[in-house]
Image (tube, coloured by chain):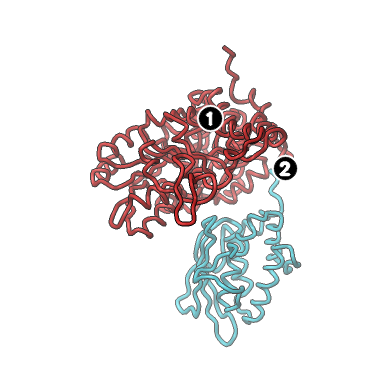
Amino acid sequence: MQALRPLGAEIRDEFPILDQQVHGKPLVYLDNAATTQRPLRVIEALSHFYERDNSNVHRGLHELSNRATAQFEEARERVARFIGAPSANTIIFTRGTTEAINLVANSWGARFIGPGDVILLTEMEHHSNIVPWQLLAERVGARIDWAPVLGDEGLLDMDAVREKLALKPKLFAFVHISNSLGTINPAAELCALARASGVTTLVDAAQSAGHLPVDVREMGCDFLAFSGHKLCGPTGIGALYGRAGLLEAMPPWQGGGEMISRVAFDRTTFKEPPHRFEAGTPDIAGAIGLGVAVDYIDELGRARIFEHDAALAREAYERLAGIPGMRLLGPRQDRAGLVSFALEAVHAHDLVTLANEEGVALRGGHHCTQPLMRKLGLAASARASFYFYNTPAEVDRLVETVGQIEKFFRR
Amino acid sequence: MNLSELYQEIILDHAKRPMNRGTLDNATVTVPAENPTCGDELTLQLRVGEGRIEDVRFTGQGCAICMASASMMTRAVKGKPCQEAGALYQKVHAGVQGTGEMPKGEISALGGVREFPQRVKCALLAWEALREALGIRKGAGGGSVVTTEEE
């Protein structure tokens, strides 16, 4: 067996984008929770497809179409393997996590959620796992209930979750790893609790699928959504996993080509899942690129990736804590590979703008979790998020830069 | 550390010790304003009499650029005829977007945002609130809360 490539500095030759200067300083890219970078093999897979194999899928009878279809469907198999799904037929390609959640809301939700029903969410959800449910609730007369988050440590209130699940909401949709806190929710436990009450579950795995081992059967979820671009894949492609029995009972959500079995002037019948949910020409190259990305992530090993990122985040957390006026968000123990923080003397936008002058790419703002930030009494926070190509030297640069900015504003 | 044109001393001074911060008891107009994408929010109050801004205050929170801009703006328009304040708004609006010259004096420091497209809206928030307070139309549409977001 081939030796595993070390993570960190030695893997950066596969990511040419990281080797550049910003404002005369080497780029330190710490915005991986927003989007990761792509390795050469993913970029090459996209150009190879367009140079050699490009064609539409499923309908063509010619060589290129056969190749494109085979690669597209093979990518579906790869994605299924990546998340432990029992079959490729349970994988629907979407534009990303957001579209996957909208699909469930508009298809499953429209059929199974009605007036007076309750949708249970957590207070740490990304807007993409809030707004589709609000739109649905408004449309059908359902109600949204919120599982609370406890303080700056950002842990889910498990007692409250138990109580609220006992009231039998129709759906419990929750984030696996919080993008603004770094909290890792106990997904398997939450799904088991929900199942015991007969509650359907949807897991937003946008921040987790590329960062720690994710297996839908071990987790026991009904739906799981993730995005390709947060795990070295292209933008504009992601996937929804749906338990087989559920997908079959769901109506289409968009109509068009590719999703029908027979169209007549008076009525149309639809294909079986997953094709029922993929109207129109899909992002073929994107799906193929995603297939390459998930194989790459599995080759590196998500347990190793998690260990690497979490070690960097722990180091950053402990050292940032030494800066005066520092408020760190999220759990101290067992945090994912990201750190969110707010400085008393410096607004997050000023901090991020000044860090950029030093070549350090951070994110500043509400991180699309406005209700949570409001609860924490913050308008904005800054966030450093790590991936397997980040290094301890970059943590040094982060801590030095934030320290300098704090001094500059404090004087 | 290269602090660039954006964070000049004058900006930091205003951000740390903003002028005219607080509320007016006898305001004739109150305008809430926000930048939803970054969370900056402020409320601007004017007391207008005989076509003149007799007094002005603001409350709110935001980044250094936003707070400094609000402080400078209130200082600049206090006691001025509304018409003059409106003309100053037009000049700053064009100046920070790089389509015109910035006015002279300390306000010129706000021109630093021209190199930082993401920060233009921080510099403009207080000025857009002023525009609304003076009843100058920005164009069609717009809700009850002033924002510098694209419509």
* Dot 2: element: loop
- Identify the residue at image location x=42%, y=41%: A175
Same chain, labels 2 and 1: yes
Going from N to C along the chain, the mark reached first, 2 or 1, is 2
Q: Quadrant of residue A23?
A: top right
- Identify the residue at image location x=52%, y=47%: A279
Chain B color in figure = cyan
Q: CA distance from mark 2 to mark 1?
A: 24 Å
Tag shown at residue A23: 2
Instruction: Give the percent coordinates (x, y) of residue A112.
Output: 33, 49
Residue A341 visible at all: no
Q: Nearer the viewer, residue B76 or A212?
A: A212
Tag 1 subunit: A
- Local crowd at mark 1 within 10 Å, few (<14), some, or many (≥20)? many
Q: Which residue is mark 1?
A: A312
- Local crowd at mark 2 within 10 Å, few (<14), some, or many (≥20)? few
